Image (tube, rainbow, N blue to C red):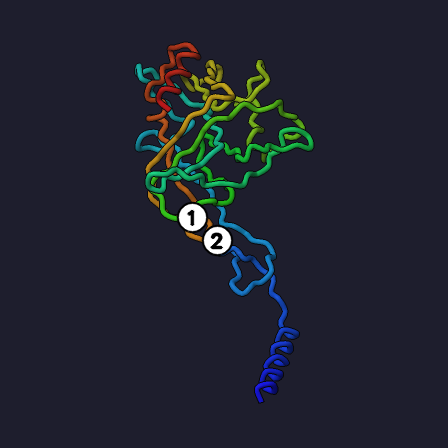
Amino acid sequence: MRSLLFCCWLAGLLLLNACYEEQEGCLDPEAVNYEVSADINGGCVYPALSFSVDHQWGDSLFSYDSLYRDVEGDTFQIRFMGLFVRELEVDTGGAWVRANTSQREWPLKRGLTQTAGERIGLIESRNFSTEWGRLSYLGAFDEFRMRLGLRELDQVDRDAIDSEHPLNLRSQMYDTLDQEYVGWAFSFRTDTSADAELRWVRAETEWSMSFSQAFMGEWLPGENSDLEFELDYEVLLENFRINASEAEMRNAINAQW
């Protein structure tokens, strides 16, 4: 009798296995398209992180058409502000964790891509939102910081830089004399007339700075996230003086940032 029951059980099990088809789907519970019943990994799509930047001057929105005052009380007009972003981290309560692992493999030379494991982003003096990449940290945080600037780059193939490439702002973020990119660039003039002198302050390629802001939030599994923050130019340019040499202006900005 036991043998007969065993044979029936075995036959049923074999029949069940013969009818069952393995399901293909994402096996990672942190992914957007996680499939709990999947048996075979069919590819995963991960939450995306984007950041939105509002540009302020104190309590007012920053404007290209406005005149501002430097530390000496002289008026000037900002014409361009560019900050390269290469790293984004969040404070999880005593430990800083990078919020990105994947990079958009921007080509720097024909057939080659940047392999440093970091993305390159760009903040300009306008309000916008930009996709940053896959989140590598999920959970609550109470502050974030960005590493701004660029590490030293190898020579870039100009033909590899398309219109979407963050390095495409050659006239503003590229030093034509030294044939290299700069970590950040700032241009201004002292009045709004068309023939007014346009002055530039540029940082070296390998120079970098860190921007931090208290920002409580939480990134949840399987959900895209947007980080919104303000850049206050009144604070960033607190020690800025227009009647100074380029080196003195750069040092004043560096000291503030």
SS under mark 2:
loop
Q: Which residue is mark 1?
A: 138
Q: Is residue 232 above or below residue 190?
A: below
Amino acid type at circle 1 is Leu
Q: Which residue is mark 2?
A: 30
SS under mark 1:
loop
**Position of residue 44 measured from the top left corner of the image (x, y, whole percent):** 56, 53
The front one of 158 and 76 is 158
Q: Residue at x 58, y 29 (%)?
A: 168
Q: Residue at x 41, y 42 (%)?
A: 227
Q: Is residue 23 above or below residue 236?
A: below
Q: In the figure, residue 253 lies in which quadrant?
A: top left
> In the drawing, does residue 231 fall left or right of residue 111?
left
Looking at marks 1 and 2 on the same chain, the residue that comes earlier in the sequence is marked by 2
Q: Residues within 10 Å of mark 2 (few under 14, many from 20)?
A: many
Residue farthest bottom in this picture: 1
How many discs appear? 2
* Residues under numbered marks 1 and 2 in contact, where contact means CB atoms less than 8 Å apart: yes
Q: Residue at x 35, y 35 (%)?
A: 213
**Position of residue 166 measured from the top left corner of the image (x, y, whole percent):** 55, 32
Q: In the figure, residue 93 lies in which quadrant?
A: top left
Amino acid type at circle 2 is Glu
The front one of 67 and 103 is 103
Q: Residue at x 36, y 15 (%)?
A: 241
Q: Residues within 10 Å of mark 1 (few under 14, many from 20)?
A: some
Q: Is residue 224 above or below residue 2?
A: above
Q: Tell me the quadrant of the picture where the C terminus can be found.
A: top left
The front one of 49 and 245 is 49
